Amino acid sequence: MSILSEDLIRATLSRIRYPGFSRDIVSFGLLKSIQLNGNDVSVSLQITSPEASIPPAIQANVEAALRALPGIGNVTVKIDIVTPAVPQAPAPKGPTPIAGVKHVIVVGSGKGGVGKSTVAANLALALSKTGAKVGLCDCDIYGPSVALMFGSRERPMATEDDRIIPIEAAGIKLMSMGFVLEDTSPAVLRGPMVTRTTQQFLRQVEWENLDYLILDLPPGTGDIQLTVVQTVTLSGAVVVTTPQEVALIDVRKAVAMFHKVNVPILGIVENMSYFLCPGDGVRYNIFGTGGGTREAERLGVPLLGEIPIDIATREAGDRGTPIVHFDPKNPISQQFIAIAERLRSTLPLL
């Protein structure tokens, strides 16, 4: 009697990873059918990818894996390649809410390197410390950092109706491209695919029963930012900057984008505001002083907080336990919790 079975074939295929990703081709939904005729096996796959190198790579891996099975006969691998359609710009319907979420807050910045993701992660945790149910979505598809900052290598699962189940860590729900990609694999995506991936993270993830969903935007005002602000009903934006003028110039561009689509600015967080020397407690204004305050006054919005450069905060993020979670009594953590309480008073829960 043949040892081959459909379950064995499926299990074998589930060990084959989609190129560049940690998930296998079965969990990605590529496998459409398995046919056994004695010891001969035929499998059908359907692949949707703009990259011409993906289908032959998967076919070679599938054939090699199946031919390695004991007692295997002829192996046939059929691949139906579906070219992803470039979304045509439909008539704009305007922003709509995310199901199951009361308030969506974007955390943005005009430029990179200002510690925006550190602020977003700790702000999400701080809101959770106030008793709210919170989620954090890493919308930086090309440079995701949330998986690293929360120290999780867990891979998201999907429901039977293709809804993505978010990762849960430190009491909040998380989604990031970093949970899908291998550590060293880049996200090689063109504009339409980036837009589609962003929409999947926002609309196909089970963000149920959340009081606040924090969206960690990439720096700048590109495709991802426009997708978010034009399609999602946002409660407001928190803008992160550093004190120096070069950062504030880019902040103004981000604020202008939010104003253009009528997203209220909830306030500014000045990160890397100063450095307190551990040895003598002397304050050093490495990047200047007062930039966030002046910009907040110019815009007529609150300065939510001035977060200093802090070694413990950096170390906590690097080891996957953001400071608010690792040490809630730390003065930096208390600053984030104060910011969270201020946001809760601005965006109360009904």
Image (cartoon, grey):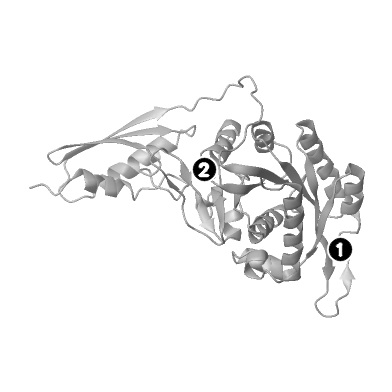
Q: Position of residue 227 (x, y in %)?
A: 65, 34
Q: Position of residue 25 (x, y in %)?
A: 38, 43
- Image coordinates for residue 33, horizontal then vertical, percent: 27, 35
Viewer-side residue, 173 vs 24: 173
Question: Toward the viewer: 6 or 105?
Answer: 105
The single residue placed furthest to the front in the displayed view is: 350
Q: Earlier in the sequence, mark 2 or mark 1?
A: 2
Could you tell me which quadrant the C terminus lies in? top right
Q: Which residue is tagged 1?
A: 286
Q: Quadrant of residue 90?
A: top right
Asked which quadrant contains residue 195, the reply is top right
Distance between mark 2 and mark 1 Cα atoms: 41 Å
Tags 2 and 1 touching, CB below 8 Å: no
Which residue does the image show at 14% across and 41% down from the upper left? Answer: 39
**Dot 1, how many residues are within 10 Å of its Cα: few (below 14), some (14-19), or many (20+)?**
few
Q: Residue 328: give its label.
A: none
> Residue 205, labelled with which disc?
2
